Image (spheres, grey):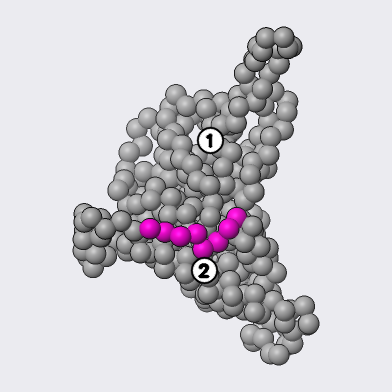
Amino acid sequence: MTFYKGTMSTLTQTDENIVPRIEAAGERLKRVHKAAASVIFGQDLVIERTLVTLLAGGHALLIGVPGLAKTLLVETLGKVLGLEAKRIQFTPDLMPSDIIGSEVLEDNPGQRRAFRFIPGPIFTQLLMADEINRASPKTQSALLQAMQEHHVTVAGQRHDTPAPFHVLATQNPLEQEGTYPLPEAQLDRFLLQIDVTYPDLAAERRMLFATTGTEERKLEAIFSPQELMAAQRLVRQIPVPDKVVEAILKLVRSARPGADAGDEASRLIAWGPGPRASQALMLAVRAKALIDGRLAPSVEDVVAMAEPVLKHRMALSFAARTEGQDIGGVIKRLAERVA
């Protein structure tokens, strides 16, 4: 059986067995996307990129003004993917114990007093960290450990988070007063930064009728947690053509000031993405191919996923900012050279 140009010329028996699994998963993921789009209007790209994040086993940072259905997105995907979902409203006075839990001393008559761990809301499969930048760095770092290591430590004892475990954090780009910007180390833990924009006129018109009437939309679970984890394993088995690997490396390395970047990039970029960006882009293009029901990712997928993967992993130089340059525009120009 032939494969896409630029990959292996033939599939092994094991690879041939993966084809019907990819096609079946792609069909179910289309149903997931359709179900989510029936509730969240005009945000098809946001839904797709959030699904890419979940299939890649990562976390996403949702950037958007209030009222763009970010909370509804998390609730909806939790239902259609069969995941337990919880929401934490981050505030400046939120303590680490408020999200990870704490130990309490139990005093039962006739028994020795003992400490018992009471899990916090972080012990869920799909966690919405609403306005994450309003929490103090101490609380943010507690979430960081769970995001990276999938466990927390309380009083020297390890407590594992459920599987799967994903964090969808939100930020309001307008209000910055009283916030604590996320450090670069924590930003790098998010697989994608997803910009949530306003819906178009037609979508907003449909939303008006759908949300102000008496009809209530009921969602059914299309996946189970175990099936989602199976799809995540399938993503990692999708073969990647050599030209796509080269495109990923060329793009990420060209976004770093230095020998691999051109003169313009070196002048415009203060600091660039690390190797984790290459890993994130590799997983993202595989997940995108699976959502589309394709057997392998393409260079076009690399271009499409470049901005959400790189945007929060690099910064413009002072010269670029004075010229009015935009980080998205710089990434777009770098991606066009790869294409």
Q: Decide if residue 238 is on the left or right side of residue 219.
A: right
Q: Decide if residue 331 is on the left or right side of residue 321.
A: right
Query: Which of 65/159 is in front?
Result: 159
Q: Decide if residue 145 is on the left or right side of residue 50.
A: right
Q: Secondary structure at mark 1?
A: loop
For the N terminus, which image quadrant? bottom right
Residue 219 on the magenta span: yes
Farthest-out residue, front: 110
Q: Look at mark 2 in the image and give the residue it sits on.
A: 29
Q: Which residues are magenta?
A: 218-225
Mark with earlier residue (1, 2): 2
Q: Look at mark 1 in the image and give the residue it sits on.
A: 121
Residue found 65% across the figure and 11% down from its top: 107
Query: Which of 103/302 is in front?
Result: 103
Farthest-out residue, bottom: 1
Asked if residue 263 shows in the view, the reply is no
Farthest-out residue, right: 13
Asked if residue 245 shows in the view, the reply is yes
Mark 1 and mark 2: span between their CA atoms?
Answer: 28 Å
Residue found 62% across the figure and 61% down from its top: 227
